[in-house]
Image: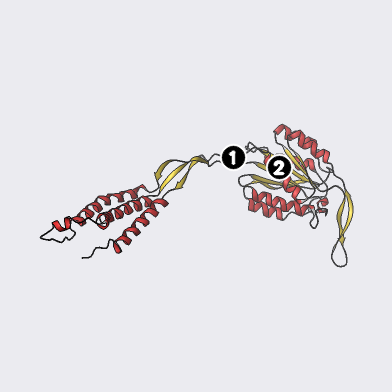
Amino acid sequence: MPLDLAFHSPQALWGLLIVPVLLYQAWRERHRRATLRFSAAHVFALQNRGLRAYLLPVLPLLRIVAVVAAILAIARPQSRDARVRDLSVEGIDIVVALDLSTSMEAGDFRPQNRLHVAKEVLAEFITSRVNDRIGLVVFAGAAYTQAPLTLDYGVLREVLKQLRTRVLEDGTAIGDALATSLNRLRDSEAKSRVVVLITDGDNNAGKISPLDSASMAEALKIPIYTILVGKGGKVPFPQGTDLFGNTVWRDTEIPINPELLQDIAARTGGEYYRATDPEGLKQGLQKVLDSLERSKLMEGGASATYREDYHPYLLLAFALAALELFLRATILRVFP
């Protein structure tokens, strides 16, 4: 509901000074109109005046009101809405720790493997964000920062696209990955800071134990959300190619440790999710965001929302001008 009315271009209202000129012109036009004189004028006085005689003085008024409406439309009247738009840039600082161990090549998400699906879902996740700073840590037998916290989602998606398995020393160093992620968030001033751990295995490498990293996160008040990718047990795993270049799959046992991920999440105030298909992974990431509190990173103030209200005035101006032209050319046409 509008609170008050304002004009975007108030200088256009100076055009209303032409209204007295138009009124004077209409007065002169009426009194200079030609009349017929008769010696027996009482004959015409006895006759009733027709509707045309009453409508003729209205023509100048139609023109004047049309001009006033046009000037008001040019001044662009605007009504301020009761709702105030917040210009503050809000967001969460998120570091995603992504497992690049060879077990992410498992094909239980066929026709794609776990890593391919994880990258696709993460790319969609990044695209859906607006003001969240996102960083990326990758790990296998060791952990590395692949991208620091950034709002440049285009660069982040390109970095994500280049990720491959068998580039790092093999293994699953969950503790090191968490410690590296926490180091990225340690100096962040955001009210909401979070680590999202995406892995498909048990900790079997690295120098820092996962529970030690969880203790550090607890001290820093940074929740860790863990997502276990894969079905567990025996899953299809690539064993090379055949003579025709097709991938040969063989069921292989890949150990998982959901209890460890549940413990990490519980200690830090995060949540544990299990993703056995692409949709489950999407839902896990969405649930992470739904549970987080928004945090203001940059103060931008507030701005009132304005609505343009010139349309009725413009339509009125055109309608009255058209009506005047129509009447002058038809039933109120004046013959010399």
Question: Real-space Cα distance between discs 1 and 2?
Answer: 22 Å
Secondary structure under tag 2 reads helix
Asked whether residue 135 appears in the rendered view, the answer is yes
Q: Residue at x 43, y 44 (%)?
A: 79
Please tell me whether mark 1 or mark 2 is closer to you in this view.
Answer: 2
Q: Tell which of 219 and 324 is nearer to you.
A: 324
Give the mark, 1 or 2, whose residue is nearer the N terminus: 2
Q: Position of residue 320 (x, y in %)?
A: 34, 55
Secondary structure under tag 1 reads strand
Q: Quadrant of the C terminus?
A: bottom left
For disc 2, the neighbor class at 10 Å (few under 14, some 14 to 19, many from 20) is: some
**165 left or right of 157 in image:** right
Color scheme of the displayed model: secondary structure
Residue type for callout 1: Leu
Query: Which residue, given by chain and number where applicable, does mark 2 sit on?
Result: 287
Q: Residue at x 40, y 54 (%)?
A: 315
Asked whether residue 213 appears in the rendered view, the answer is no
Identify the disc placed on residue 307: none
| Residues at marks 1 and 2 touching, judged by CB atoms closer than 8 Å | no
Q: Tell which of 284 and 34 is nearer to you.
A: 34
Q: Position of residue 145 (x, y in %)?
A: 71, 46
Query: Which residue, given by chain and number where applicable, does mark 1 sit on?
Result: 297
Q: Position of residue 285 (x, y in %)?
A: 71, 45
**Based on the displayed image, in which of its 4 quarters is residue 219 positioned?**
top right
